[in-house]
């Protein structure tokens, strides 16, 4: 099993930077449970359950606990992660946040 996120889009190429529209679309990757958006390179990817749990662990280490209960794939599908860097851009600030899809 591959834990790397599947890159589904780069917001630099999306008309009107429609992140919410992309997040509401069905997953492409059959293992996907959530999305991850890199604030540095503006890349959006689909992530599996192991990757999501890793991001939640990082949030706990950083003292940035998610307010929502994120125990099942159905819970995770309602939210997306925002990170300071990703595998595409390689290096940046260690930060992880989570937002409910549709909230600003």
Image (cartoon, rainbow, N blue to C red):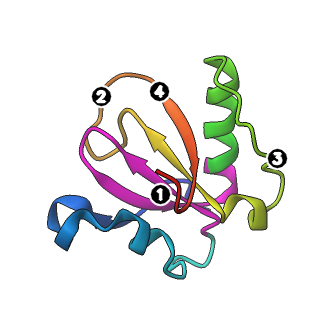
Residue at the image position 83 percent from the left and 52 percent from the top: 71
Image quarter for residue 3? bottom right
Task: Determine contact: label 1, label 4, CB under 8 Å.
Answer: no
How far is mark 2 from mark 4, CA to CA?
11 Å
| Label 3 to label 4: alpha-carbon separation | 20 Å
Which of the labelled discs sits on residue 91, or is there none?
2
Q: Mark 1 to mark 4: distance in Å? A: 17 Å
Q: Nearer the viewer, residue 48 or 60?
A: 60
On the rendered structure, is 79 left or right of 35? right
| Span highlighted in magenta in the image | 32-51
Residue reaching furthest to the front:
104
Residue 102: x and y in percent read 52, 62
Point out the tag, 3 or 4, that comes first from the N-terminus: 3
Q: Nearer the viewer, mark 1 or mark 4?
A: 4
Q: Tell me: residue 91, above or below residue 30.
A: above
Q: Earlier in the sequence, mark 3 or mark 1?
A: 1
**Residue 38 lies in magenta, yes or no?**
yes
- Mark whose residue sits in front, 2 or 4: 4
Q: Which residue is mark 3?
A: 69
Q: Nearer the viewer, mark 3 or mark 2?
A: 3
Mark 2 and mark 1: span between their CA atoms? Answer: 16 Å
Circle 2: element type = loop
Residue at the (69%, 31%) spot, across then down:
57
Q: Residue at x 70, y 36 (%)?
A: 66
> Could you say which quadrant of the image residue 38 lies in?
top left
Q: Between marks 3 and 1, how big is the CA–CA gap?
A: 22 Å
Residue appearing at x 70%, y 44% in the figure? 53
> Which callout, 3 or 2, points at the residue further toward the start of the chain?
3
Label 2 vs 1, first from the N-terminus: 1
88 lies left or right of 6: left
In the picture of the structure, the residue carrying the numbered disc 1 is 5
């Amino acid at each position: 099993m591959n834990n790397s996120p599947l890159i589904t889009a780069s917001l630099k190429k999306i008309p009107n930077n429609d992140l919410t529209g992309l997040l509401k679309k069905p997953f492409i990757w059959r293992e996907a449970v959530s999305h991850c958006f890199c604030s540095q390179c503006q890349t959006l990817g689909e992530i599996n359950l192991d990757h999501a749990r890793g991001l939640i662990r990082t949030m706990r280490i950083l003292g940035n606990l998610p307010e929502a209960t994120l125990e099942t794939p159905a819970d995770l599908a309602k939210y997306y992660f925002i990170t300071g860097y990703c595998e595409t851009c390689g290096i940046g600030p260690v930060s992880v946040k989570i937002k409910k899809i549709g909230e600003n």
